[in-house]
Every structure is written in structure tokens, then in C-alpha cells.
Amino acid sequence: MTYGWAILIIAIVLVALFSLNLFNPYTFAPKASPGSCQIIRPNGPGSNIFVSAVGLCNNEIPQYVARFNGQTSYVNLSSNPSILGGTFTVSFWIRMSVFPNQSDLQISVDPVSVAGDGCNGSFNIVINQSGNIQANQCSIVVNYVSPKPLAIGSYAFVTVTHTQGNPVTLYINGVLVGESGVGVSYANTGPYWIGDGPHGHVNGIFSNVQIYNTSLSPGAVNTLYNEGIGGAPVDIQNLAGWWPLNGNAKDYSGNGNNGVPTNVFFTSNWENGYSTPP
């Protein structure tokens, strides 16, 4: 009986330590502090002359990520990143806590509005109740979804690329999983949000949001995924905005498009559900 009580106590202690995330290999790993890596543009925002990355830019995991409460959390960008000619890439890491009740909850940046379509809708990256990623073009949902839904409590790397007049492509964890099947055109009108949209708010975690004014190649997308959740931008010349969300909502692309967070909690306890890309 004594041994039984001892084993029970040990089991309880182990469960408590596990709940505190002490067995996660990332819990005690070195983590990059806010702003430890950033892009410098000596000739001002939008300039590509002598652009360089400075600081700790070796893809260290972040100290913080941004937690959104699903009700009132969002980041509004103070100015619009320049996306030239409607050709762009949007990428981010996300861990959903709860899937939305609605079928088209926006979960990312709202980068562009449809050109010449006569409506005020925008191009949104959305998620449905089953965890499928979709694209919402004005009032028309672009006809692709990911073949494997996102999993509650697990991180995923989502990338959407588009070249003006061509299909929109979707990547999950660096792998192409679908495209719109038709060519579409957009104009850079904004506005820009992270975690908010016309149908609701994100309930989960965002990290490392990047926007490029070019359509990254499949190889570049895969490289960005393999860098992990703390990955630095892969094309600083065409980087329009970079929000690591590592402790703040500042734009570290050198373009000055800082975000204004509302009811966003920057947490250092984020490791559960994350694993290093293979």
C-alpha cells in the first residue's frame, strides 16, 4: 500500500510538471527577444537600396506569440503595406484554440480588394468549422480548401501566393494543397487587419505574419516553412511587411507599417503543439 501511494504521488507530480510544459524541448531553449532581428532600409520605407537584415536573424524561436481571444482581439495596421500590381504572398503561423461557428471567419491579413468587381468585399484568408482553409473573394468563395483540416491545438504554417491574373495558390506547412483554378485580379486598397474580419475574430495564436509584394516560388515557400516559427523573411527586397508578433505588433520590414493591437495578449507560454519542421 505504501508503494502504491508513492507511485500515485509520483504520477500526480509528473502530470503537474507535464501540464506546466516542463517536458517540452522548447520550454528552456534560447528564444529571440522582441526586435532582435529586423530589416534596415537606409533610404527610408519602400526603398530597396542597401537593404539588409541586422541582429539575431538565425531563425531562433520567438520569446512571445500573440494570443487572440476570439471575441475582441485584433491588430489594425497603421498604414497599408505596398503590394505592387496585386501580386503578393501572405504567410503566417497559427494555432487555433477553437474553430469558428461561422463558415468564413477571417484569420489573417486582409491585404487587397477585388478590382472592378463593384463591391466592397476583400480578399480574406478564412477558416471554417472543420478547420479547412479557404479564400474569400468579395462575395464569392474561391473554390479550394485544404485536403487536411487544421488540428485544434497544433501549429500550422499557412501561405497564400498570387500573381496578378493567375490562380491563387494555398500552401500548408510548405506543401501546395490547392489553387483557385481561375485567374483573378486584385488592387491594393486595404484596409489591413490581423485576426479580425467582417465575420468575427480569431480564437488562437498568431505568429510571424509576413507579406511580400511578389509571389514566392514553391521552393521559397518551403524554405520559409523549414525555418520554423521564428523564421526570418526569405526575400527582403520584396518584403512589404513583417510582424513577428514577438511581444509587440511592430513592423520589422523597415517599411513602418506598425500594428495597433487591441485585446491581444503576448504570451511566452506557447510551445505546446509546436514541433520543428522535418
Image (cartoon, rainbow, N blue to C red):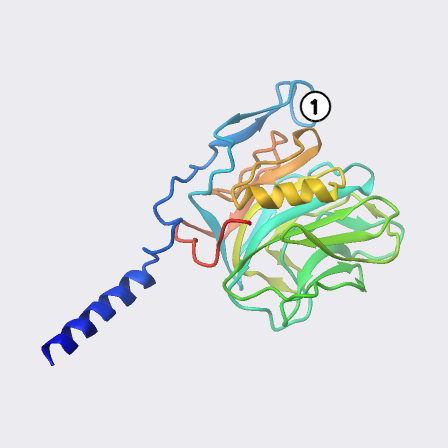
Number of numbered discs? 1
Residue shown at 76% from the left, 41% from the top = 215
55 vs 45, nearest the viewer: 55
13 vs 242, nearest the viewer: 13
Residue shown at 53% from the left, 68% from the top = 98
- Identify the element where label 1 is drawn: loop
Dividing the picture into quadrants, the one containing residue 39 is top right
Residue shown at 70% from the left, 23% from the top = 48
Q: Is residue 91 left or right of residue 244?
A: right
The N terminus - image quarter: bottom left
Q: Please rate how many residues cluster around mark 1, counting C-alpha atoms within 10 Å: few if below 14, some from 14 to 19, many from 20.
A: some
Percent coordinates x, y for residue 199 in the rendering: 66, 65
Residue shown at 50% from the left, 63% from the top = 153
Residue of label 1: 48
Percent coordinates x, y for residue 231 in the rendering: 55, 40
Percent coordinates x, y for residue 223 in the rendering: 63, 41
Percent coordinates x, y for residue 17 in the rendering: 28, 61
Q: Is residue 222 above or below residue 239?
A: below
The residue furthest left is 2
